[in-house]
Amino acid sequence: MLNNFRYSLPDTLHDRLENIATEWQTQNKVARVWQRDASVWTGEDEAKWLGWLDVLDAQLADADKYREFYADIEDFERVLLMGMGENFDGALEAAKKVADANVQAWESWMALWGVKK
């Protein structure tokens, strides 16, 4: 399922995308990003932008706060998760998996509202 992505582009954009994808593959750029190699881009100040690579480890190290939060809301009957940006879909899927509640979504502002049973 992960590799079933389909797209359609004009020929000039398609060729450019194929060239960029080939470059990333042949130059092992994904691994280099995870190694914090700023030369993947310009090699200037990009290193300071790579803190997001540690997000998962940081969140797992602080998992107790999520357990405490869940304990606070586990009696909710419905949850409205509102968000904005590309991370919203992941947050919505996580909320659906974690909560035994009816999770409704509205993508705009990041907030969590609940109604107790």
Image (cartoon, helix red, strand yellow):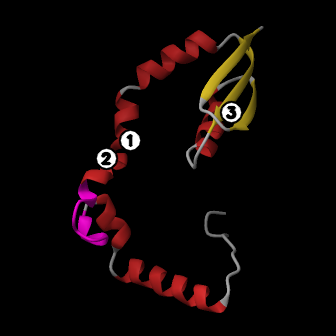
Q: Is residue 8 above or below residue 4?
A: below
Q: Quadrant of residue 23?
A: bottom left
Q: Are marks 2 and 1 in contact (CB under 8 Å)?
A: yes
Viewer-nearest residue: 18 or 61: 18
Instruction: Kindly identify the amino acid type of the residue bearing the numbered disc 3.
Output: Lys
Q: Residue 84, position in %: x, y?
A: 61, 41
Residue bearing the label numbered 2: 51
CA neighbours of label 3 inside 10 A, class few (<14), some (14 to 19), many (20+): some
Q: Position of residue 100 (x, y in %)?
A: 71, 23
Q: Nearer the viewer, mark 3 or mark 2?
A: 2
The label on residue 11 is none
Q: Are marks 3 and 1 in contact (CB under 8 Å)?
A: no
Q: Residues within 10 Å of mark 2 (few under 14, many from 20)?
A: few
Mark before the other along the chain sequence, 3 or 1: 1
User: Mark 1 highlights which residue?
Assistant: 55
In the figure, 88 relative to 30: above or below? Answer: above
Q: Circle 1 sits in a helix, a strand or a loop, which is it?
A: helix
Find numbered disc 3 in the image and state the secondary structure of the residue it sits on: helix
Q: Is residue 95 above or below residue 72?
A: below
| Residue at (33% x, 44% y) in the render | 54
Distance from disc 2 to disc 1, alpha carbons, whole Å, reads 7 Å
Query: Split into 4 quadrants, where in the image is the C terminus?
Result: top right
Is 46 contained in the magenta span? yes
Query: Seen from this angle, which residue lies furthest left?
Result: 44
Mark seen at residue 96: 3
Instruction: Measure how far apart labels 3 and 1 are at the Cα level.
Output: 21 Å
Magenta segment: 37-47
Image coords of residue 24 (percent x, y) = 40, 77
